[in-house]
Image: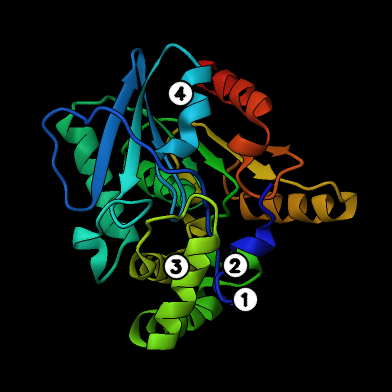
């Protein structure tokens, strides 16, 4: 299990969702300098969006364990072995969301379910708010990225801008971030600059005020550890954050540090299966 504390870059940076890399057959007739997409299985369409520095391999257990769906596995360029290309500079999160939306339209997908872990959860909610996709499952992510470490978009956003400049604009910062990436599970081959840019973007995102506009069902799985007091605190934080969405269903799952689908595969797959069938 990966504890949340191990996911904070530089002690004051924000959040990460780290998993395993991987891929499969490419989606037909779609090329992008922001994302790559692989498709597995057949049935109703579901987009699987991994978190920061993760590749689509984080969903391998889901793809093999939950039958009857056509899985579209998103791989953000610059993460888990893919060259950064257009994600190498400037904003990352919004352009990636725009490219996923373009993919959905190009493939003619009709209201696919959106499942996102950590940063992928942010992307899933952004897409749903734009009318792309239907039901949404968010895995261990708050509507405001900075809130994952107790901050706000207004306060942490400035800090993230400064950290982003440090991580990408100084030799020491680049070396430090590269060291963290090398040691983090599933982050091998990720571009430190893309990670820094994505962290900066996430710190400035707060979707809370827009949650009431989500057009479809919303389910939020959040990770809890073995400590009962800490689990209660985490639960209260998630319930407060998602309160604007009156129909949101919150499900604690653990013990897990952050990558719930790896820490609790059987329970996660059962919960996802029920969510997709409801």
Q: Earlier in the sequence, mark 3 or mark 4?
A: 4
Q: CA distance from mark 3 to mark 4?
A: 28 Å
User: Which colour style is shown?
Assistant: rainbow
Helix, strand or loop status at disc 1: loop
**Outermost residue toward the right in this view:** 228
* Residues packed near mark 4 inside 10 Å, few (<14), some (14 to 19) or many (20 plus): many
Query: What mark, if any, has residue 199 been given in the picture?
Result: 3
Taking the image as shown, residue 22 lies to the left or right of residue 13, namely left
Nearer the observer, disc 2 or disc 3? 2
Q: Between 164 and 208, which is closer to the camera in this rendering? A: 164
Q: Earlier in the sequence, mark 3 or mark 1?
A: 1
**Outermost residue toward the left in this view:** 29
Q: Residue at x 51, y 17 (%)?
A: 66
Location of residue 14 in the rendering, given as x and y in whole percent from the top left corner: 55, 69
Location of residue 104 in the rendering, given as x and y in whole percent from the top left corner: 24, 34
Helix, strand or loop status at disc 3: helix
């Amino acid at each position: 299990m990966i504890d949340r504390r191990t996911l904070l870059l530089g002690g004051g940076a924000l959040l990460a969702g780290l998993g395993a890399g991987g891929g499969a057959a490419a989606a037909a007739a779609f090329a992008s300098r922001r994302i790559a997409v692989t498709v597995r299985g057949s049935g109703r369409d579901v987009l699987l969006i991994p978190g920061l520095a993760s590749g689509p391999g984080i969903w391998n257990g889901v793809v093999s364990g939950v039958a009857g769906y056509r899985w579209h596995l998103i791989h953000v360029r610059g993460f888990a072995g893919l060259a950064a290309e257009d994600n190498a500079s400037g904003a990352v999160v919004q352009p990636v969301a725009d490219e996923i939306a373009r993919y959905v339209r190009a493939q003619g997908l009709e209201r696919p379910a959106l499942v996102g872990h950590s940063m992928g959860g942010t992307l899933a909610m952004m897409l749903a708010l734009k009318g792309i996709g239907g039901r949404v499952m968010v895995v261990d992510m708050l509507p405001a990225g900075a809130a994952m470490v107790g901050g706000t978009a207004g306060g942490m956003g400035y800090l993230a801008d400064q950290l982003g400049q440090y991580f990408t604009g100084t030799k020491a910062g680049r070396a430090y971030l590269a060291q963290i990436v090398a040691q983090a599970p599933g982050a091998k081959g990720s571009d430190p600059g893309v990670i820094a840019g994505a962290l900066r973007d996430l710190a400035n995102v707060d979707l809370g005020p827009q949650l009431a506009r989500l057009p479809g069902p919303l389910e939020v799985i959040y990770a809890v550890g073995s400590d009962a007091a800490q689990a209660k605190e985490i639960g209260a934080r998630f319930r407060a954050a998602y309160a604007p969405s009156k129909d949101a269903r919150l499900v604690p799952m653990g013990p897990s540090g952050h990558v719930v689908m790896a820490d609790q595969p059987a329970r996660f797959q059962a919960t996802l299966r029920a969510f997709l069938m409801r």
